C-alpha cells in the first residue's frame, strides 16, 4: 500500500500549474516544510522541504493554501525515471488535504 501522511507548513503560496479546459479541475503545486527530528553534522535540526502536487478535488478551500498555512496531507508517492540519466524522481500526490490552523 502506498500511503503517506505529512503534517507541515506551506512555504510560499500554492501555484496552479494546470487547469482543465472546462475550468473545473486544477492542479496545485507547493512545498511543505516538515520538522526533521534528526540533527545535521552542525548539530541543528534541519527541516525537510517536500514537493506536493494536489488536484482541486483533494482541496476543500483553495484560498486557505497560502504561505505559512499548517496542513495535514494524506498522499501517495509517485515515482518516475528520467530516461536520459536513469535518475528516479519522487513526488507526493495528495489525496486529501486538511487545513489545520
Image (spheres, grey):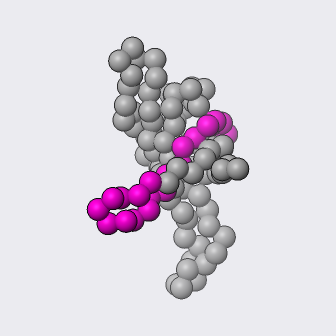
Q: Quadrant of residue 85?
A: bottom left
Task: Please state which of residues 83 and 10 is positioned toward the viewer in this rendering.
Answer: 83
Whether 44 is drawn above or below 92: the answer is below
Expressed as whole percent of the image width and height from the top left, the position of residue 89 reads 44, 58
Quarter of the picture holding the C terminus: top right
The one nearer the camera, 84 or 101, is: 84
In the orientation shown, which residue stands out farthest toward the right?
1
**Magenta-span inclusion, residue 82:** yes
Quadrant of the image occupied by residue 16: top left
Read off the magenta span: 80-101
Q: Residue at x 46, y 17 (%)?
A: 24
Q: In the rendering, at what x and y percent does residue 29 appear?
A: 44, 41
Identify the residue at horizontal 52%, vertical 84% (top origin).
42
> Where is residue 50 shown, x and y percent of the image?
51, 55
Residue furthest toward the top? 22
Percent position (x, y) of residue 47? 55, 65
Amino acid at each position: 500500500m502506498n500511503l503517506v501522511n505529512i503534517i507541515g507548513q506551506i512555504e510560499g503560496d500554492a501555484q496552479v500549474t494546470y487547469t482543465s479546459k472546462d475550468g473545473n479541475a486544477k492542479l496545485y503545486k507547493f512545498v511543505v516544510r516538515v520538522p526533521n527530528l534528526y540533527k545535521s553534522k552542525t548539530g541543528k535540526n534541519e527541516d525537510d522541504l517536500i514537493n506536493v502536487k494536489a488536484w482541486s478535488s483533494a482541496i476543500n478551500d483553495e484560498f486557505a493554501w497560502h504561505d505559512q498555512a499548517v496542513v495535514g496531507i494524506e498522499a501517495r508517492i509517485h515515482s518516475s525515471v528520467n530516461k536520459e540519466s536513469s535518475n528516479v524522481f519522487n513526488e507526493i500526490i495528495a489525496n486529501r488535504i486538511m487545513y489545520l490552523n
